[in-house]
Image (cartoon, rainbow, N blue to C red):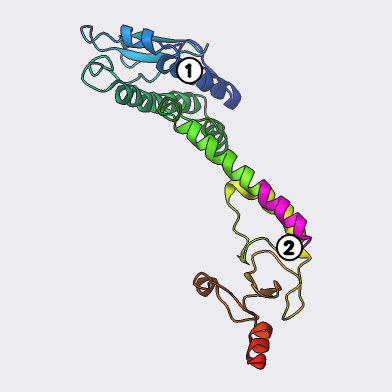
Amino acid sequence: MDGGGAYNPRTVEEVFRDFKGRRNGMIKALTTDVQDFRRLCDPEKENLCLYGLPNEQWEVNLPAEEVPPEIPEPVLGINFARNGMVEKDWLSLVAVHSDAWLLAVAFFFGSRFGFDKADRKRLFNMMNELPSVFEVVSGTAKKQSKEKSSVSNNSSNRSKSNSKRGGSEPRPKYSKAEPKEEEEEEEEEDDDEQGETECGACGENYAENEFWICCDLCESWFHGKCVKITPARAEHIKQYKCPSCSNNKRGRS
């Protein structure tokens, strides 16, 4: 059994297309076609493997007879564990081994056709953009998608709230340019607004990678160095009062 090995992709794009086709076939076997897959994994038969094919199909078959095989082989004996495990756990185990096999096949082609460091990195990044077989089968991919959607919605709501206040200040109470991956685009849009914010102490504008803190009373922003507040100290301040607001309070008392 060659698992579609007769097809030899030679470029990064072709290897990725091959990877994607095999991946989709294996996902189909472990999700929409799971009853057929389970039936074919008969524990009474010899060592069986799950093969994903480049045309997005799949098959359960015996391993290749030739040694060494034309391409890397999937894990053996998936049928033996069928009746000894909870079905969900069994499918997840097959999915994990399927992910390992898909990567092995992709980088086998990469090595065979002389991919350099840049090509291997580009190939991995392309594959890594897709959820793994295990993430799809276990439902993790859907959960991650919902979490990203929730983060996006919350970020959008915060942006609308800030626009109603009409201020041009940076959004958090204290800020250092360390955007999360999910909010990179939003942070880039806010950079222009932050650049217009002036420090209440020295009068200079906001600059990238500078630590700032906002007064909870007057809502003015300050360089941490200007008011002698470090990021570590700011973590423990529940309500920050700038020097001016602190002096005014003492003057009234």
Mark 2 and mark 1: span between their CA atoms? 47 Å
Residue at the spot x=48%, y=10% of the render?
57
Majority SS type along the magenta span: helix
Helix, strand or loop at disc 2? helix
The verdict on residue 166 being magenta is yes
Front one among 53 and 233: 233
Closer mark to the observer between disc 2 and disc 1 = 2
Query: Which quadrant holds the N terminus?
Result: top left
- Quadrant containing the C terminus in the rendered view: bottom right
Checking the image for residue 89, the label placed there is none
Task: Name the amino acid, label 1.
Answer: Arg
Which quadrant of the figure has residue 129? top right
**Disc 2 target residue:** 194
- Residue at screen point 62% across, 75% down: 224
Q: Residue at x 54, y 18 (%)?
A: 9
In this orientation, which residue lies closer to the viewer: 165 or 127?
A: 165
In this view, 33 is above or below 147: above
Numbered range of the magenta stretch: 156-167
Q: Which residue corresponds to the image point at 33% horizontal and 17% vertical from the top-left?
A: 68
Secondary structure of the residue carrying numbered label 1: helix
* Residue 107 in picture, x, y percent from top left: 46, 28
Amino acid under disc 2:
Gln
Q: Which residue is mark 1?
A: 22
| 144 to the left or right of 194 | left
Q: Position of residue 85 (x, y in %)?
A: 24, 22
36 to 83, vertically: above or below: above
> What is the crowding at mark 2: few (fewer than 14 residues within 10 Å), some, or many (at least 20)?
some
Q: Depth check: 7 or 103 in front?
A: 103
Q: Position of residue 59 (x, y in %)?
A: 40, 9
From this viewpoint, is residue 70 visible? no
Whether residue 83 is visible to the viewer of this picture, yes or no, is: yes
